[in-house]
Image (cartoon, rainbow, N blue to C red):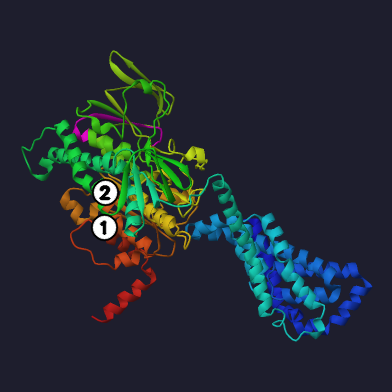
């Protein structure tokens, strides 16, 4: 605690001690005020300035210290100085005192509260930053809310001091006027309870609601102004048009059709989108083949001698296509048509908030969901455009294994494909500008993957910047700068660009409608997945902020409900629990906060870690490497986040996803029976480690004495 805080605490302690020891509360009662009314009025008549100044200072002190008696002081203001001067003095004194109480609360408590409960308060903080003046104004208008409590609570939030002051000044004015006016007749009052009738309180409540009503009206006017340039159809052809048949679009269509709504799904390329055709399905199929090749290589370690196998890369890639073909019917036109979805092949163009053109046909619709996904992000590096580079969309066309493969990007896509190609026999180099692979994960997780890569012979050039690509007699090469500025020449036969994905927002009408985008180029949507036009919604990679297939499905559910029934009830997406996994070996999975994010956000946490080299099943499988790591609220078993590095981490993380979703803590996981021997036991052992670390050590000697006495 710094010097200023010590001084404030000391002054508060002295003031409170004086208030209690001198029984100052007796002077802030209705009975005492009435008994001294004539005397106070006489003093004011003799020296108005001195009396008003003393009254002002006392009022500020009472309010700043949050002492009971502000209501009596307000009544006295009206009784002594009349409505005009009384209202002026009380209005400013109460606002100044409230601001001082606000500042004391902020100085002494805000950092502690935000550090301890920052994760839980994240949504509230954002709301206060955005609409804090509205919140405070509404509370100030309703006299039934304790003003001193509002002062203290608002001090814990991010609201600015000046905003707090002027909103308090304006917001408390009407309530202050009621009390000051009542104070004019102070001698006739029998109790404070009679000051506010039910009708008067209701009037204040309705008045407090006016800013929010006004805000909603302004939002409606603003949205309608955007749509005003477009004529609303007199009749609609369908309830919903969905653009894009990837994960988000398919889920949106199936939800709408399941609700018996009329829905048209438009796809310009392949049903199933990226996930089926160029993303999750083919990459996991390739990883599976690569894992078999690696298992054969390691067969002797399992007691199998003479095992051998030759990688037929063309056959591997044909298997990838067979897997896609096997899953394809799940996402096919035939299936969705049978479910009641009108599937249209063609390029959609949004002509208005209620119309979409495709194949020369205009479809009038009540709502539109944009689910156009994303595409590989290609950097502007000199010479790259002149090289036949690969990316996550076209790498599946390969039928000859590259002898030397350069992977640009150490994120999830780059890491998964780099390891798979290395296991299939390529000499792989991974280049990334970050100091570690998978830069969003904790360093211990990244380092474990880096170790596995190096052991497999993958060359890692981390902290390197791309400078120039060029072709020569010896083949293609990249010039890159090392962290110390040294230039390095990297030769390769094929280069795979895996630097993230860019939302598909161009070419289908968003520009003409001037639909706002985020800084990252995604469609700007609210928590209901609505764009600036209420009838146009978006989900999946094109909307962000997460580019995961499961999040596209998650968002699609909310987008569809709001598209079909948003006029009755708004359904808002909650991103509190968002899991993800990178399917390298070892796998890396996470939900919620990791240590890096907790430190960045100044969130206090307690760490519990369990090493997989202690787990029987992992030892039996020969996969005893990795860990389970859980962050919890200090002094509680509530889970802030969990990270798992090891075999099947993407499956194991499910325990923590379920627990966090349903507000369960580690005690629930510890108390759940798990099958032995399974990898899933690692989660229970982690929870038990948390519980064991919190056994009260002082009680153990007493327990020992108790049990010895029973021998």
Q: Which residues are magenta?
A: 422-435
C-alpha gap between disc 2 and disc 1: 11 Å
Residue drawn at x 75%, y 73% as measured from the top left = 178
Image quadrant where residue 88 sits: bottom right
Of 700 and 65, nearer the camera is 65
Query: Quick one: which residue is furthest to the top in this view?
Result: 473
Residue drawn at x 20%, y 48% as measured from the top left = 623
Residue drawn at x 45%, y 45% as measured from the top left = 355
Secondary element at image label 1: helix
Identify the residue under disc 2: 646
Image quadrant where residue 388 sits: top left
- Seen in the image, is 266 located left or right of residue 208? left
Is residue 428 on the magenta stretch? yes
Which image quarter holds the N terminus? bottom right
Of 89 and 567, nearer the camera is 567
Q: Is residue 73 in sight in this rendering?
A: no
Which image quarter holds the C terminus? bottom left
Residue drawn at x 16%, y 50% as measured from the top left = 621
Identify the residue under disc 1: 682
The image shows residue 493 at horizontal and vertical percentages of 26, 23
The image shows residue 321 at horizontal and vertical percentages of 20, 38
114 shown above or below 300? below
- Seen in the image, is 298 located left or right of residue 613? left
Secondary element at image label 2: strand
- Seen in the image, is 201 located left or right of residue 599? right
How many neighbours does mark 1 have within 10 angstroms: few (below 14), some (14-19), or many (20 or more)? many
């Amino acid at each position: 605690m710094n010097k200023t805080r010590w001084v404030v605490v000391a002054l508060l302690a002295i003031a409170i001690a004086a208030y209690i020891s001198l029984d100052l509360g007796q002077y802030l009662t209705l009975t005492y005020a009435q008994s001294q009314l004539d005397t106070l009025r006489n003093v004011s008549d003799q020296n108005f300035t001195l009396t008003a100044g003393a009254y002002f200072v006392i009022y500020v002190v009472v309010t700043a210290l949050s002492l009971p008696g502000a209501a009596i002081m307000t009544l006295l203001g009206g009784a002594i100085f009349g409505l005009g001067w009384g209202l002026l003095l009380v209005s400013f004194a109460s606002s100044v005192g409230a601001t001082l109480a606000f500042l004391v609360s902020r100085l002494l408590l805000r950092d502690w509260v935000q550090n301890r409960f920052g994760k839980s308060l994240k949504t509230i903080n954002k709301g206060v930053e955005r609409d804090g003046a509205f919140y405070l104004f509404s509370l100030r208008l309703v006299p039934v809310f304790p003003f001193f409590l509002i002062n203290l609570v608002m001090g814990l939030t991010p609201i600015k001091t000046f905003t707090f002051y002027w909103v308090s000044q304006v917001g408390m004015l009407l309530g202050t006027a009621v009390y000051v006016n009542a104070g004019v007749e102070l001698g006739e009052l029998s109790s404070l309870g009679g000051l506010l009738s039910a009708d008067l309180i209701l009037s204040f409540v309705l008045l407090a609601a006016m800013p929010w009503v006004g805000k909603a009206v302004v939002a409606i006017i603003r949205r309608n102004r955007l749509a005003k340039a477009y004529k609303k159809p007199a009749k609609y052809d369908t309830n919903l048009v969905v653009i894009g048949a990837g994960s988000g679009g398919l889920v949106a269509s199936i939800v709408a059709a399941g609700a018996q709504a009329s829905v048209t799904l438009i796809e310009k390329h392949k049903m199933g989108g990226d996930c089926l055709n160029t993303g999750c399905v083919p990459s996991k199929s390739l990883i599976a083949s690569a894992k078999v090749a690696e298992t054969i290589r390691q067969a002797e370690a399992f007691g199998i001698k003479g095992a051998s196998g030759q990688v037929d890369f063309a056959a591997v890639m044909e298997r990838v296509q067979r897997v896609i073909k096997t899953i394809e019917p799940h996402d096919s036109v035939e299936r969705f048509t049978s479910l009641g979805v009108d599937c249209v092949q063609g390029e959609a163009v949004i002509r208005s908030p209620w119309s979409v053109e495709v194949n020369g046909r205009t479809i009038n619709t009540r709502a539109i969901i944009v689910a156009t996904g994303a595409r590989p992000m290609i950097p502007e590096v000199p010479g790259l455009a002149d090289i036949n580079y690969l990316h996550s969309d076209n790498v599946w066309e390969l039928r000859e294994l590259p002898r030397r493969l350069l992977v640009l990007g150490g994120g999830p896509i780059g890491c998964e494909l780099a390891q798979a190609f290395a296991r299939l026999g390529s000499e792989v180099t991974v280049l990334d500008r970050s100091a570690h692979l998978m830069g969003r994960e904790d360093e211990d997780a990244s380092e474990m993957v880096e170790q596995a890569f190096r052991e497999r012979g993958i060359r890692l050039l981390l902290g390197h910047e791309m400078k120039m690509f060029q072709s020569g007699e010896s083949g293609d090469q990249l010039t890159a700068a090392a962290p110390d500025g040294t230039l390095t020449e990297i030769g390769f036969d094929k280069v795979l660009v895996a630097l993230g994905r860019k939302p598909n927002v161009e070419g289908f009408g968003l520009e003409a409608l001037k639909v706002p985008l985020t800084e990252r180029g995604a469609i700007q949507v609210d928590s209901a997945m609505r764009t600036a036009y209420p009838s146009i919604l978006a989900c999946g990679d094109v909307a962000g902020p997460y580019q995961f297939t499961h999040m596209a499905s998650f968002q699609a559910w909310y987008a569809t409900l709001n598209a079909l029934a948003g006029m009755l009830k708004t359904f808002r997406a909650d991103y509190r629990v968002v899991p993800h996994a990178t399917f390298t070996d070892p796998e890396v999975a996470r939900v919620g906060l990791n240590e890096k994010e907790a430190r960045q956000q100044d969130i206090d946490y307690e760490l519990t870690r369990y090493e997989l080299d202690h787990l029987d099943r992992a030892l039996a499988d020969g996969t005893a490497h990795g860990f389970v790591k859980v962050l919890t609220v200090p002094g509680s078993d509530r889970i802030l986040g969990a990270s798992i590095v090891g075999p099947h981490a993407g499956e194991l993380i499910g325990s923590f996803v379920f627990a966090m979703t349903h507000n369960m803590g580690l005690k629930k996981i510890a108390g759940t029976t798990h099958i032995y021997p399974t990898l899933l036991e690692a989660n229970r052992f982690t929870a038990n480690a948390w519980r064991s670390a919190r056994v009260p050590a002082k009680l153990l000697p007493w327990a020992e004495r108790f049990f010895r006495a029973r021998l």
